[in-house]
Image (cartoon, coloured by chain):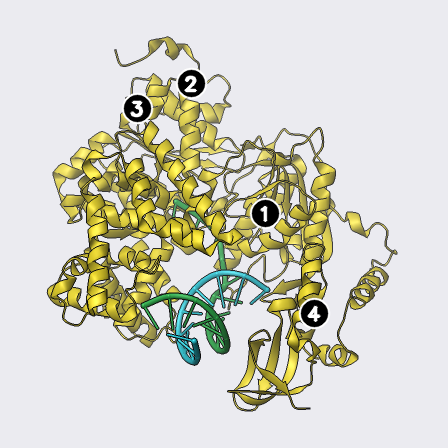
Chain colours: A yellow, B green, C cyan
DNA sequence: TAAAAAATCGTTTTT
DNA sequence: CGATTTTTTA
């Protein structure tokens, strides 16, 4: 009775091409689908799940692992259309992390965790690492906590424990990192928390724990499907191997040309060795592209063929030839953004919506200039990625309060909120409480509860500690008979957080209050539709949510995002900005062949997002770290077959291609904005510093009036480059640069005693000597 | 103890 | 440049 046979008439195979049909109708045994960009792989995966259900496989025996929650949601939505809602709901579809978090929540006790364990994101991880470094007296200036975090994460991705890492550590950095790794593991465990890597690692541990647990999950997940297989790491590979070992019903879809997460531990061997691991594997190639014009497809092929390491394939399309690809050079990043904004205005008309246009860039920092340009022209836009809603400070604080409520043994979380708002427990008291906890082998929260037994503590601090513990306990007592969203609401109201922001009273603070209210609303919506779930489930969801999952994509807005975020998406028009050497391909210290190939795959991903139009832009100069840098066009531009490209802004130029006159006029125009003395101009040409001040002083419409007002108030407005000044602590020095305006105006001073310093003129007491 | 001032640091990309 | 961390001062 559990199957809806009336729907079994739907012919799932009807609109598929022969290869897609083969892949969809393959039921038992291992299957590798090599799916080129735009070849309909998501469609095949979805059809296949529907086909399995139609062939009497129970939906709850199907595990479909996707790269984002959004992809999982879409898949479920389409399955619901083909089969029915209750079947689609029963399929286990989600990201590796969210599915395994769910299972680990159930099995936590088997691994020595409590089921209320908290999930640490990269920020939480970093602050724990810093804390550990403090307690081990490892200087943070000498050993970068970031670097240690990536070492720890890389180890976990390769399933190397701290014991093994310490054994093989030779450099001083590795030795220190190993010490931190060890202590980090001890603390994260005693905090009853898991980081993102642990969610996968602990899943392997769980499956290896006993034959009966392994049997249980092998029986549960009789059919396994994995999307974006080229971006799985070794731990994910292990999990899949263990789960598929008995029944071998594993189907993976991937494209080695789109592997862009090697830096995160993705291992291309997973896809290359699939046949070795599953000798009976059937391989199907999807090579017809349904997405892009011939021109765009040719361009992508001409780029990717420069990579040596790749599986040979021949993508083709029946789509029309399409328009040529535009390449546009701009003076600087601001002009580039203005050009793009203008272009979007021109393009977005009756035949194309703004939501069919996306602008892609290599680094999140590039969004700033674009956002300004769009705001200036009132073009609606949406930024995906960057600072996600759930990563905002006030939201993380509220979530930390809730995490503490569900898991009081998490010292890290308690540390985060104890002075938010300030409640009279400063550094000294906190140190006493922490030491007391360590000596007694109890959690920090327990040490708060028994603060009156703590001799080192001031009377006032004891009172404050006990008051805080009572506040938490009062709400812990309510957990079992209050709905989580209502509990959260009154808990946060009593926390003092809201009052804190109300008192601050700035626009920023009221934004934050708004966000907190939004979060509480989001919670009640969540628990309205999932009344059987607990507070921990909501918290897990927020930790694992990606920015993309949260955004409302129905409004007509231009999308801005990084190339990484764009994976798996498609738009009618794609604009890729910042095609410059060093930015894209992005170059850090030294640049290996492998890294270059990964950058090129990223470019390939970017190009193949476009259905009809592609526009590539680059700037000759770019503001970086507040300094102007000259840029060279990306070598990737040269890799596209020249006959596919056109340069629309070169048309008006003289035949030898020189654009000097135009550029010179622009340059002269920008000079005329300068307000500083001639002396500044000459010394400025010697280094980037002064020319950067010149750049940032050009007022834009947005804050011009504000600037001029502040200029008048500023006492130090008379300072010039070259002035010899005296500072109360640093002594004598010479001003070598001035930048910023109004209250943010800064001076770069070369002091005789301490060398180059940058000082805020608003604060620094500078006296002109000559 | 907490707020204000000053210095430092940083950039890939994200589940 | 901006965000974050450390130091100073009230």
* Disc 3 target residue: A59
| Chain containing mark 1 | A
Q: Please name which of the two marks, 2 or 4, marks the residue nearer to the observer.
A: 4
Q: Is residue A51 above or below residue A615?
A: above
Q: Which numbered circle lies on residue A82?
A: 2
| Mark positioned earlier in the residue sequence (1 or 4) | 1
* Disc 1 target residue: A360
Instruction: Residue at the far right: name it.
Output: A654
Q: Which numbered circle lies on residue A712?
A: 4
Badge 1 vs badge 4, beta-carbon distance below 8 Å:
no
Give the x, y percent position of residue A555: 57, 33
Q: Is residue A178 visible?
A: no
Badge 3 vs badge 4, beta-carbon distance below 8 Å:
no
| Mark positioned earlier in the residue sequence (3 or 2) | 3
Q: Residue at x 56, y 79 (%)?
A: A764
| Mark positioned earlier in the residue sequence (2 or 4) | 2
Q: Residues within 10 Å of mark 1 (few under 14, many from 20)?
A: many
Asked if badges 2 and 4 are on one and the same chain, I answer: yes
């Amino acid at each position: 009775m559990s199957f809806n046979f009336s729907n079994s008439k739907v012919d799932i195979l009807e609109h598929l091409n022969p290869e897609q049909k083969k892949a969809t109708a393959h039921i038992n045994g291992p299957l590798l689908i090599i799916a080129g960009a735009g070849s309909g792989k998501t469609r095949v995966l979805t059809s296949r799940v529907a086909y399995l259900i139609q062939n009497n496989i129970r939906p709850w025996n199907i595990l479909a692992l996707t790269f984002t929650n959004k992809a999982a949601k879409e898949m479920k939505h389409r399955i619901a259309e083909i089969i029915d809602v209750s079947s689609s709901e029963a399929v286990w579809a989600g990201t590796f992390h969210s599915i395994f978090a769910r299972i680990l929540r159930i099995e936590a006790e088997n691994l020595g965790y409590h089921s209320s364990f908290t999930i640490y994101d990269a920020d939480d991880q970093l602050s724990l690492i810093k804390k550990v470094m403090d307690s081990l007296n490892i200087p943070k200036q000498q050993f970068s906590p970031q670097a240690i975090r990536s070492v720890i994460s890389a180890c976990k991705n390769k399933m190397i424990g701290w014991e093994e890492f310490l054994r093989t550590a030779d450099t001083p950095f590795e030795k220190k990192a190993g010490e931190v790794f060890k202590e980090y593991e001890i603390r994260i465990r005693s905090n009853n928390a898991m980081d993102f890597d642990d969610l996968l690692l602990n899943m392997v541990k769980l499956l290896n724990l006993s034959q009966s647990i392994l049997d249980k999950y092998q029986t549960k997940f009789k059919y396994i499907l994995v999307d974006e297989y080229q971006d799985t790491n070794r731990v994910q590979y292990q999990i899949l191997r263990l789960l598929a070992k008995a029944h071998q019903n594993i189907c993976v879809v991937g494209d080695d040309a789109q592997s862009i997460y090697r830096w995160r531990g993705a291992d291309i061997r997973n896809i290359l060795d699939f046949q070795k691991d599953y000798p009976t594997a059937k391989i199907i190639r999807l090579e017809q592209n349904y997405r892009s014009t011939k021109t765009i497809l040719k361009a992508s092929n001409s780029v990717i063929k420069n990579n040596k390491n790749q599986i040979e394939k021949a993508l083709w399309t029946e789509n029309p030839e399409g328009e040529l690809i535009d390449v546009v050079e701009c003076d600087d990043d601001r002009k580039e953004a203005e050009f793009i904004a203008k272009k979007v205005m021109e393009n977005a008309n009756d035949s194309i919506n703004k939501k069919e246009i996306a602008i892609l860039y290599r680094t999140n920092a590039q969004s700033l200039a674009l956002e300004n340009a769009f705001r200036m022209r009132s073009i609606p836009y949406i930024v995906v990625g960057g600072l996600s809603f759930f990563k905002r400070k006030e939201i993380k604080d509220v979530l930390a309060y809730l995490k503490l409520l569900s898991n009081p043994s998490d010292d890290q979380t308690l540390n985060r909120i104890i002075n938010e708002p300030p409640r009279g427990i400063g550094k000294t008291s906190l140190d006493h409480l922490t030491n007391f906890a360590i000596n007694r082998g109890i959690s920090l929260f327990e040490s708060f509860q028994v603060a009156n037994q703590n001799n080192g503590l001031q009377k006032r601090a004891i009172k404050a500690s006990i008051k805080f513990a009572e506040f938490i306990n009062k709400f812990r007592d309510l957990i079992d008979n209050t709905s989580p969203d209502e509990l959260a609401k009154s808990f946060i109201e009593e926390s003092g957080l809201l009052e804190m922001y109300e008192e601050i009273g700035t626009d920023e603070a009221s934004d934050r209050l708004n966000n907190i209210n939004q979060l509480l609303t989001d919670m009640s919506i969540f628990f309205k539709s999932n009344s059987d779930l607990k507070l921990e489930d909501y918290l897990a969801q927020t930790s694992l949510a990606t920015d993309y999952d949260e955004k409302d994509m129905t409004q007509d807005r231009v999308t801005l995002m990084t190339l990484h975020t764009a994976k798996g998406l498609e738009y009618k028009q794609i604009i890729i900005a910042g095609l410059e050497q060093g930015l894209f391909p992005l170059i850090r210290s030294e640049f290996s062949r492998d890294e270059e190939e990964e950058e090129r795959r990223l470019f390939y991903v970017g190009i193949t997002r476009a259905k009809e139009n592609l526009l590539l832009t680059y700037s000759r100069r770019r503001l970086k770290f507040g300094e102007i840098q000259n840029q060279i066009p990306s070598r990737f531009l040269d890799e596209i077959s020249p006959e596919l490209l056109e340069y629309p802004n070169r048309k008006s130029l003289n035949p030898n291609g020189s654009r000097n006159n135009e550029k010179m006029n622009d340059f002269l125009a920008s000079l005329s904005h300068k307000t500083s003395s001639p002396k500044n101009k000459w010394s400025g040409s010697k280094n980037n510093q002064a020319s950067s001040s010149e750049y940032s002083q050009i007022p834009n419409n947005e804050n011009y009036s504000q600037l001029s007002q502040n200029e008048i108030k500023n006492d130090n407005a008379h300072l010039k480059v070259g002035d010899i000044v005296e500072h109360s602590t640093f002594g004598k020095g010479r001003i070598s640069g001035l930048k910023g305006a109004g209250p943010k105006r800064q001076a770069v001073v070369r002091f005789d005693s301490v060398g180059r310093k940058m000082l805020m003129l608003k604060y620094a007491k500078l006296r002109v000597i000559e």
